[in-house]
Image (tube, rainbow, N blue to C red):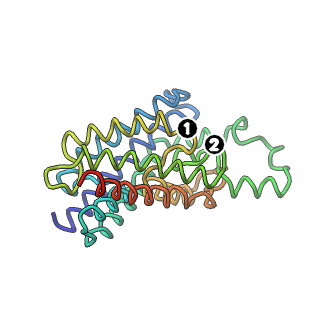
Amino acid sequence: MSSSDIFIGETIGTAILILLGGGVCAAVTLKASKARNAGWLAIAFGWGFAVMTAAYISGPLSGAHLNPALTVALAIKDGGWNNVPVYFAGQLLGAVIGAVLVWAAYYGQFLAHLTDKEIVGGPGAQATSAKAVEAQEKGAGPVLGIFSTGPEIRNVAQNLATEIIGTVVLILAVLTQGLNDQGNGLGVIGGLITALVVVSIGLSLGGPTGYAINPARDLGPRIVHALLPLPNKGGSDWSYAWIPVVGPLAGGAIAAGIYNLAFA
């Protein structure tokens, strides 16, 4: 496959992944959404179906990596690093596009949610202390969870370990069960298997951090959250942002090492 095919495939596939995955988070979270409060099961299965849809659409073009952690794992497994930057660029651009599309699809719901006094506070909330305002701006705003992940308990070691463990499970499943005949991306059955693994990770390991298990999936939408003109959106929690990038990349590398030692 050519570099242009890889870039286009990863851009389209990752955009669809984030559109559908971020979309289910918006549907469950936002005021005036028909699916509001549908719960964690809806989110876990929504992300799984998002992976499956994106993989089937982008697979013929790029092999449907859709995740820098998988790209790194395959490069370690096969020793081929030439197209890694192209994969990364397509994945990050696609994640940004997907997040913007979520905002466009739920534009009215975002406005209703972020202007609701019960959610963001009324006029009295504006009179809070300067320290409280600063904390809200630096921390996670009320809709950040639609765009990116965040921990329920902020513990760097635990949060990082959770992302590494979840990613190792995901990438090992792809490397052992999900690759196409060329071994450079997801196959037809692999797309379904990977989708079900993502659901399993969400249900089993998603509670502590929201299971990014994909650096582009977290970083691209977080950038969009920071840039979009959303009222009362709060901060983008950049102090946490390195964990869902470093953790999955480390998990992908560890999974590739395990694969090479145990399965190759």
Q: Residue at x 77, y 41 (%)?
A: 122
Task: List x then y, in percent, for residue 73.
Answer: 33, 59
Residue position marked by numbered label 2 in the rendering: 152
Against 16, is 40 above or below? Answer: above
Residue 207 got which mark? 1
> Label 1 near label 2: C-beta < 8 Å?
yes
Task: List x then y, in percent, for residue 27.
Answer: 49, 34
Looking at numbered disc 1 in the image, what kind of residue is underneath it?
Gly
11 or 55: nearer the viewer: 55
Q: Residue at x 45, y 51 (%)?
A: 99
261 or 111: nearer the viewer: 261
- Dot 1: element: loop
- Real-space CA distance between mark 2 and mark 1, rounded to the nearest whole angstrom: 8 Å
Task: List x then y, in percent, for residue 15.
Answer: 35, 52
Lower position in the chain sequence, tag 2 or tag 1: 2
Q: How many neighbours does mark 2 have within 10 angstroms: few (below 14), some (14-19), or many (20 or more)?
A: few
Residue 55 got which mark? none
Give the mark count. 2
Q: Residue at x 59, y 45 (%)?
A: 143
67 or 13: nearer the viewer: 67
